[in-house]
Image (spheres, helix red, strand yellow):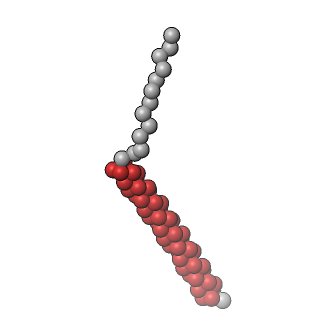
Amino acid sequence: MAQSETRLVTQPSSSVTHANYQLQCASQQASEENIDKNINKRMLEERKNREKANVNKNEDVKNE
Protein backbone atom coordinates (compact mmCIF):
# COMPACT_ATOMS: atom_id res chain seq x y z
CA MET A 1 0.00 0.00 0.00
CA ALA A 2 1.37 3.43 -0.94
CA GLN A 3 1.90 5.98 1.76
CA SER A 4 0.32 9.37 1.22
CA GLU A 5 2.44 12.48 1.57
CA THR A 6 1.27 15.51 3.43
CA ARG A 7 2.87 18.75 2.39
CA LEU A 8 2.68 21.91 4.39
CA VAL A 9 2.22 24.98 2.23
CA THR A 10 3.53 28.13 3.84
CA GLN A 11 3.82 31.71 2.76
CA PRO A 12 7.37 32.90 2.17
CA SER A 13 8.81 34.78 5.07
CA SER A 14 9.17 38.52 4.74
CA SER A 15 12.97 38.14 4.55
CA VAL A 16 12.62 35.83 1.52
CA THR A 17 10.20 38.24 -0.11
CA HIS A 18 12.56 41.14 0.59
CA ALA A 19 15.52 39.17 -0.82
CA ASN A 20 13.56 38.46 -4.00
CA TYR A 21 12.68 42.15 -4.26
CA GLN A 22 16.35 43.08 -3.88
CA LEU A 23 17.29 40.61 -6.63
CA GLN A 24 14.65 42.09 -8.94
CA CYS A 25 15.92 45.61 -8.23
CA ALA A 26 19.53 44.56 -8.87
CA SER A 27 18.51 42.86 -12.09
CA GLN A 28 16.60 45.93 -13.25
CA GLN A 29 19.52 48.18 -12.36
CA ALA A 30 21.89 45.93 -14.35
CA SER A 31 19.52 46.09 -17.33
CA GLU A 32 19.38 49.87 -17.12
CA GLU A 33 23.18 50.04 -16.94
CA ASN A 34 23.44 47.84 -20.05
CA ILE A 35 20.96 50.07 -21.87
CA ASP A 36 23.00 53.14 -20.89
CA LYS A 37 26.21 51.49 -22.10
CA ASN A 38 24.59 50.53 -25.42
CA ILE A 39 23.25 54.06 -25.93
CA ASN A 40 26.64 55.59 -25.15
CA LYS A 41 28.37 53.14 -27.49
CA ARG A 42 25.94 53.92 -30.31
CA MET A 43 26.31 57.68 -29.78
CA LEU A 44 30.11 57.36 -29.90
CA GLU A 45 29.93 55.36 -33.13
CA GLU A 46 27.61 57.93 -34.69
CA ARG A 47 29.91 60.78 -33.64
CA LYS A 48 32.91 59.00 -35.16
CA ASN A 49 30.97 58.48 -38.39
CA ARG A 50 30.02 62.19 -38.52
CA GLU A 51 33.62 63.24 -37.85
CA LYS A 52 34.85 60.89 -40.57
CA ALA A 53 32.27 62.29 -42.99
CA ASN A 54 33.39 65.83 -42.13
CA VAL A 55 37.04 64.94 -42.74
CA ASN A 56 36.14 63.41 -46.11
CA LYS A 57 34.09 66.49 -46.99
CA ASN A 58 36.99 68.79 -46.05
CA GLU A 59 39.40 66.73 -48.15
CA ASP A 60 37.03 66.98 -51.11
CA VAL A 61 36.89 70.76 -50.73
CA LYS A 62 40.71 70.97 -50.63
CA ASN A 63 41.00 68.86 -53.77
CA GLU A 64 38.71 71.12 -55.82
Kindly indicate the quadrant of the structure image that contains residue 24.
bottom left
Note whether residue 52 is visible: no
The residue depicted at 56 percent of the width and 74 percent of the height is 46
Q: Position of residue 3 (x, y in %)?
A: 47, 16
24 relative to 42 in the view: left or right: left
The residue depicted at 36 percent of the width and 47 percent of the height is 13
Q: Position of residue 35 (x, y in %)?
A: 50, 65
State the quadrant of the C terminus.
Answer: bottom right
In-front residue for pair 12/63: 12
Above or below, 35 against 15 in this view is: below
Q: How many marks?
A: 0
In-front residue for pair 4/62: 4
31 relative to 18 in the view: left or right: right
Above or below, 57 against 5 in this view is: below
In-front residue for pair 8/15: 8
Q: Position of residue 10 (x, y in %)?
A: 41, 40
Kindly indicate the quadrant of the structure image that contains residue 42.
bottom right
Q: Residue furthest right?
A: 64
63 relative to 5 in the view: left or right: right
Note whether residue 2 is visible: yes
Q: Position of residue 40 (x, y in %)?
A: 48, 70
Q: Residue furthest top?
A: 1
The residue depicted at 60 percent of the width and 88 percent of the height is 62
